Image (cartoon, rainbow, N blue to C red):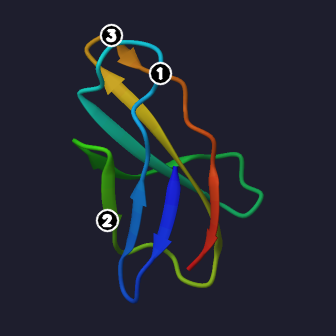
């Protein structure tokens, strides 16, 4: 997964998982600082998304979870960012 900062919005992109069935969608999650709680930050139908309305000045970690009719896959590795 890659985090690309832009002026106002933040774009994330990633690769399709190697294992499991074809993903129908991807759930984007984030957590702040040292929190152990992941919050849903968005949903994407493809391999990238643009996030808006994210907390500014906070240290955030983002990850992606592939979703298909069998359920959710394993979360991706996280990417740290300060917006």
Residue at horizontal 34 percent and vertical 26 percent from the top: 67
CA distance for labels 2 and 1 = 23 Å
Q: Could you say which quadrant of the image residue 30 lies in?
A: bottom right
Q: Nearer the viewer, residue 39 or 83?
A: 83
Image depth: mark 2 or mark 1 in front: 1
Mark 3 secondary-structure assignment: loop
Image depth: mark 3 or mark 2 in front: 2
Q: Could you say which quadrant of the image residue 16 lies in?
A: top left
**Pointer 2 residue:** 50
Q: Position of residue 34 (x, y in %)?
A: 77, 58
For residue 24, side relative to residue 47 (left or right) = left
Q: Decide: is 23 above or below 63.
A: above
For residue 17, side relative to residue 58 (left or right) = left
Circle count: 3
Mark 2 secondary-structure assignment: strand
Residue at horizontal 43 percent and vertical 39 percent from the top: 15
Instruction: Find residue 18 and name its label.
Output: 1
Q: Position of residue 62 (x, y in %)?
A: 55, 54
For residue 49, side relative to residue 1 (left or right) = left
Q: Decide: is 53 above or below 79.
A: below
Instruction: Find residue 45 and name its label.
Output: none
**Pointer 3 residue:** 70
């Amino acid at each position: 997964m890659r985090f690309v900062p832009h002026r106002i919005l933040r774009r994330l992109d990633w690769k399709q998982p190697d294992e499991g069935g074809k993903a129908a969608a991807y759930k984007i999650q984030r957590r702040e600082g040292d929190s152990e709680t992941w919050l849903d930050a968005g949903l994407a139908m493809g391999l990238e998304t643009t996030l808006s309305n994210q907390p500014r000045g906070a240290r955030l970690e983002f990850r992606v979870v592939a979703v298909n009719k069998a359920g959710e896959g394993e979360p991706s590795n996280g990417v740290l960012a300060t917006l």
